[in-house]
Amino acid sequence: MGFFSENDKRTLRTHLSGMSDPVQLVFVKRDTMCPYCRETRELLKEFAEFSDKIRVDVYDIDKDAGEIGDLDIERVPALALLDHSMKDTGIRFYGMPGGYEFHSLLGAVLVVSKRRTGLPEDLVRQISQVDTPLHIQTYVTPTCPYCPSVIRLIHKMAFLNPHIRADMIEVTEFPELGKEAGVKGVPKTIVNHLFDLEGALPEDQFIHTIIKNL
């Protein structure tokens, strides 16, 4: 039995038919001590079958360090998105993008493929002006309906600016990270390990809060 219902399949085909450029999904796994790696790999494999413009490359974090070293993958399962020119977009998923977070994966693929974020020009300008490294980590769960809006936003920020890396972290798969970050509820966003934002804020408020604290 697959991950998607017949209705899901029809919806995905419709969304993905609008892809422009190909997108490479770099999936990083480990064969042991990774309970969600196999399931995540199967999800990505099934997802890629809906478009010939989605490619999934699979690497092992221990065996393929040379091939994935530039991506700076910290834990598994992990997913990085590369654009049509094989350039790292800074978009990361740590943990299986299941449940509500599958919408975040679909959104990221479409942003990278179409090279459009849909953000207002003033927000695009603010994001583009960031000129120092910015690491955004947002903790989520697959059952949180408010989390995808934050994940989609931070991934758009990463796509727009090479100084920005944006991580989705599925906290139930990485409870030790959640404990260290003091996650009591989701979504919770940690910026450069210095300050955090709670909840799903409006786009302009979220971006302005981050930038003013840099």
Image (tube, helix red, strand yellow):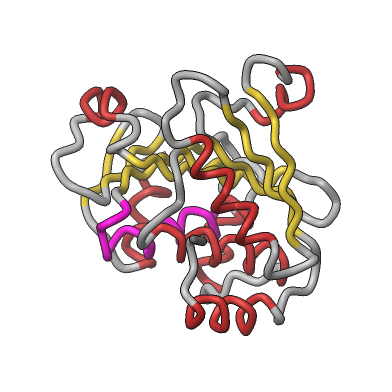
Residue 110, horizontal then vertical, whole percent: 63, 69
Q: Residue at x 51, y 38 (%)?
A: 134
Q: Main secondary structure of the magenta part?
A: helix
Q: Residue at x 31, y 68 (%)?
A: 202
Q: Nearer the viewer, residue 178 or 199?
A: 178
Quarter residue 181 falls in:
top left
Viewport quadrant of the C terminus: top left
Q: Residue at x 41, y 58 (%)?
A: 101
Q: Residue at x 26, y 31 (%)?
A: 178
Q: Nearer the viewer, residue 152 or 52?
A: 52
Q: Residue furthest front?
A: 1
Residue 129 shown left or right of residue 134 in the figure: right
Residue 98 visible in the snapshot: yes
Residue 207, horizontal then vertical, whole percent: 40, 57
Residue 207 visible in the snapshot: no
- 143 relative to 182, above or below: below
Residue 96, horizontal then vertical, whole percent: 45, 45
Start-end of magenta stretch: 142-157
Quarter residue 193 falls in:
top left
Q: How many marks?
A: 0
Residue 168 shown left or right of residue 12 in the figure: left
Q: Nearer the viewer, residue 107 or 47?
A: 47
